[in-house]
Image (spheres, grey):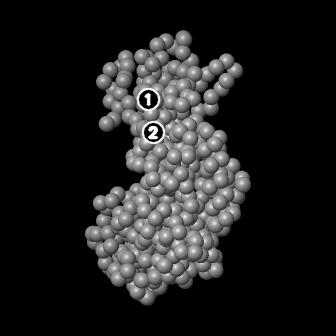
Amino acid sequence: MGLNPINLAQSTKRIYEQNLGSWSTQEFLPMGCLENEETGATFLWQIENNGSWYWEVAESSELMFPTVKDHNLMITNDGNEISGEIYFVLSGPTEWESQWHKSLKPGKSFITVPTAVSVVNGGFEKAVVEMTKYRRKIRRPNKDNEKLAVIFNDYMNCLFGDSTTEKLLPLIDAAADAGCEYFCIDCGWYTDTNWWAGVGEWKPSAQRYPGGIEKPIKYIREKGMIPGLWLEIETVGFDCPNIDNIPKSWFFRRHGKIVSDQCRYPLDFRNPEVQDYATSVIDRMVNEYGVGYIKMDYNINSGIGTEVDSDSLGDGLLEHNRAYLAWLDSIFVKYPDLIIENCGSGGMRMDYAMLSRHSIQSSSDQTDYIKNAAIAASCATALTPEQCAIWSYPLSGADPEETTMNMVNAMMLRIHQSGHLATLPANQFNLVKNGIEVYKMIRNDIKEGLPFWLTGIPKFEDPWFTFGLECDNCAYIAVWRISGEKILNVPLKEELQKYQHVEPVYPQNTLDCAYINENHTISFLLEETKTARIFKLY
């Protein structure tokens, strides 16, 4: 896997990752890290594009730079040759990897995809801290990332896209009682049949909501919460009631044919008519239905791009991606307090082209709360904690520890509450309610906290893992014991050694404990496996 010195004259070895299509994070995040173990210097980068991207680490060679005299790139500022040094390339779409090229006419220009590099004397975690600071600086100013509102969404391990007024009303009661501040009705509200292929017209189902969807939306407001709806504005389904009236020029096209994926057509946002249509849908959601939150999903990958009015397929995709971002900017100008969640089948578009606009990101559609714990504990490498929505979905009648772990998964980030709260036994419901109460007490710290990991970045197979946030005068640390021995001893990082005390934060009546030793080691005692706790260091 490494770069080994085989031939002094040249090297054709590279280490690289890439993404192809409109799911920017379908397999890998648009990130990488290069650490010099001898000097301690670490370079952490992110590519800010909501589509295809490419990065490469390799060795510079005389093959790349034939003569010192003719190629200034071979000379450093002090006059030394750089042949034989390690370089990295950060890029949006490329010709070889993503079928992108663009021909510039005289007087025209092209702006490349933005990238950011965090450079530190230290390891990966210190580089993540600096990247977190940068991400907060480039993000659109918004009230949501100041308040960190608690959202209930009826999808995950709950209604799964089959909402009705009858099913919603008790859930709305329970969510309000638990302390949720937004209530989002997820997919399916616009069709009586196949919610997947029926996207596109965005008019409520009369069968699901007798008397109109306005009834449950009004009830959400009466209960003191702000209503939300699910949308997938960038696609039109095969079963959309209005499909025959949509101009074919709205769609991606390759090899002379309209592009489709999984019973849906991707829309081309370079077309002004598409943007007008999308804006009219948002207008209706906000002005007619009274929605203050939109879960904006994106469940297909449009592929390598479109041949319509483009120099290459990749050029068509990149221009569409940028047109979508411009449209999104216009919506936030028009409705600055509207929260639009960035969701792409969970976290398939978790990049900072999108997250410089969106205040909240769906991290995953993982249905297993144990696996979701490892995802939650790792997510701050990819985005700021206050933007990262994590599902909490306790199942009725389950062990109370399952409810506790579901809450711990979300409480250091953004609570995306779900599950059948209306049917939870009282002991489980009280754990949810208490978790939300505690979250509201610590969320002002979360929005400024900087991440750390006492046990390293988690892996699914780890017996224990941790995730912490260092704040102004304290630190919070979530601890999960999945398996293994009941005591975890781990040294405190130097920046945390100023703290001498530790106390449980959630659940508040736990008998499990943590204590700091004289040698700056912290010990956690969790009696049972598949348990999780939150502690405060001060």
Disc 2 packing (10 Å; few <14; some 14–19; many ≥20): some
Furthest residue to the right? 334
Q: Residue at x 65, y 60 (%)?
A: 284
Residue 267 screen position, x and y as percent: 53, 43
Q: Amino acid at mark 2?
A: Val
Residue 474 screen position, x and y as percent: 57, 70
Q: Quadrant of the N terminus?
A: top left
Circle 2 is placed at which residue position? 259
Image: 537 above or below 126: below
Q: Residue at x 51, y 76 (%)?
A: 165
Pick the front one: 518 or 356: 356
What is the secondary structure assignment of the residue under circle 2?
Answer: loop
Q: Residue at x 28, y 69 (%)?
A: 483
Circle 1 is placed at which residue position? 255
Residue 291 screen position, x and y as percent: 63, 66
Please identify the quarter of the rendering in which residue 372 is found: bottom left
Pick the front one: 434 or 178: 178
Residue 305 screen position, x and y as percent: 48, 35
Pick the front one: 410 or 331: 331
* Residue 350 placement, left or right of 338: left
Q: Residue at x 43, y 27 (%)?
A: 96
Q: Quadrant of the C terminus?
A: bottom right
